[in-house]
Image (cartoon, rainbow, N blue to C red):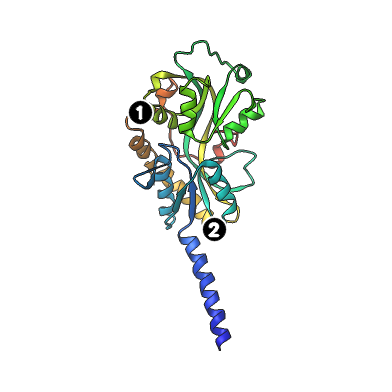
């Protein structure tokens, strides 16, 4: 009888633990304003609002945790049943995650200071003439290395966006990576504006993804995919962009018309490297 009671207790604990993991999944992210960042002890941002809505649509309450990107990336690989946002879908990462879907479209450029007319970049072949400041562990950092750029010569590798911006504004690098969401915010926080930079080379136009650890429950992943489709069609993305961009027109970063944030379809996104 005592043995039966012990077995029942163990089964109950295992069942409760599995249910807790399913009902309150751990989701890893990083500090990258205004996409996802901590404010007054709460993780907020454009993508955070979208991710919260996706999990809510699926009937779940995510436990979102923010760390530096390299740690976040390793955490989601090692933590069974966990999730990560925002992450770029690349050939190197394709089989490491279960891909729930693109949640936010963005364009990634290399930028120079507007005052540096001497910095002339017409193609990736010109990048070896200059120094570009990048972020550790980012897909675009790997892409630039694959093009033959080296951290010992043409690249300065930093830990986060704030450090990257500081290196760039001090003139230690001629070029910096960025997209229509992250660069405007980083410049403003440093006392500058988009008038102080100029895009010189479009690197890619891909979606930011929400992804799952390979051992996440496939049924849960499918629920989240369906939930993402509904959220993308709801207009929430446009409202989140307006909320966090605070009057910044995404198109002003590129001199082109604003990016269309129509609902994204996973099958329409090409899986090249992006920041």
Q: Residue at x 44, y 28 (%)?
A: 183
Quarter of the figure with residue 32: top left
| Residue 65 vs residue 173, the one in the foreground | 173
Residue 225, given in percent of the width and then of the height, sits at 50, 50
| Residue 119 spot, x, y in % from top left | 53, 13
Give residue 196's quadrant in the image: top left
Name of the residue lying farthest toward the bottom: 1
Q: Nearer the viewer, residue 132 or 212?
A: 132
Q: Quadrant of residue 245?
A: top left
Relative to 130, 53 lies left or right = left
* Circles 1 and 2 in contact, beta carbons < 8 Å: no
Q: How many tags in the picture?
A: 2
State the SS at label 1.
loop
Identity of the residue drawn at 49% across and 24% down: 168
Instruction: Locate residue 20 relative to residue 189 in the image: left or right.
Output: right
Instruction: Calculate the distance from the C-alpha at mark 1 to the C-alpha at mark 2.
Output: 39 Å
Residue at numbered disc 1: 248
Give me the disc on residue 219: 2
Q: Nearer the viewer, mark 1 or mark 2?
A: 1
Q: Nearer the viewer, residue 118 or 270?
A: 118
Q: Is residue 227 above or below residue 178?
A: below
Disc 1 residue crowd, few under 14, some 14–19, many 20+, Cα 10 Å: some
Q: Quadrant of the C terminus?
A: top right
Foreground pick, 266 / 95? 95
Residue 239 in percent (x, y) is at 35, 39
Other residues around mark 2 within 10 Å, as few (<14) / some (14–19) / many (≥20): few
Image quarter where the N terminus lies is bottom right
Q: In the drawing, what numbered circle is on residue 99?
A: none
Q: Give the secondary structure at mark 2.
A: helix
């Amino acid at each position: 009888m005592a043995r039966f009671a012990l077995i029942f207790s163990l089964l109950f604990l295992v069942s409760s633990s599995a249910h807790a993991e399913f009902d309150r999944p751990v989701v890893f992210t990083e500090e990258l304003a205004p996409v996802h960042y901590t404010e007054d002890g709460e993780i907020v941002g454009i993508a955070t609002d979208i991710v919260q809505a996706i999990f809510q649509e699926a009937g779940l309450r995510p436990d979102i945790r923010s760390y530096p990107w390299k740690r976040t990336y390793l955490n989601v690989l090692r933590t069974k049943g966990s999730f990560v946002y925002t992450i770029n879908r690349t050939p190197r990462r394709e089989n490491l995650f279960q891909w729930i879907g693109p949640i936010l479209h963005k364009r990634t450029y290399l930028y120079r200071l507007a005052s540096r007319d001497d910095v002339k970049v017409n193609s990736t072949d010109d990048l070896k003439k200059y120094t570009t400041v990048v972020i550790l562990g980012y897909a675009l950092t790997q892409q630039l290395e694959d093009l033959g750029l080296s951290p010992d010569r043409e690249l300065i590798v930093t830990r986060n966006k704030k450090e990257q911006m500081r290196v760039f504004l001090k003139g230690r690098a001629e070029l910096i990576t960025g997209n229509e969401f992250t660069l405007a915010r980083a410049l403003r926080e440093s006392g500058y504006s988009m008038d102080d930079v100029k895009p010189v080379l479009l690197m890619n136009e891909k979606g930011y993804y929400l992804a799952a650890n390979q051992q996440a429950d496939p049924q849960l992943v499918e629920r989240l995919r369906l939930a993402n489709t509904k959220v993308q069609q709801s207009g929430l993305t446009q409202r989140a962009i307006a909320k966090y961009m605070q009057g910044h027109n995404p198109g002003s970063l590129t001199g082109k018309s604003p990016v269309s944030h129509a609902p994204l379809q996973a099958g329409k996104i090409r899986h090249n490297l992006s920041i």
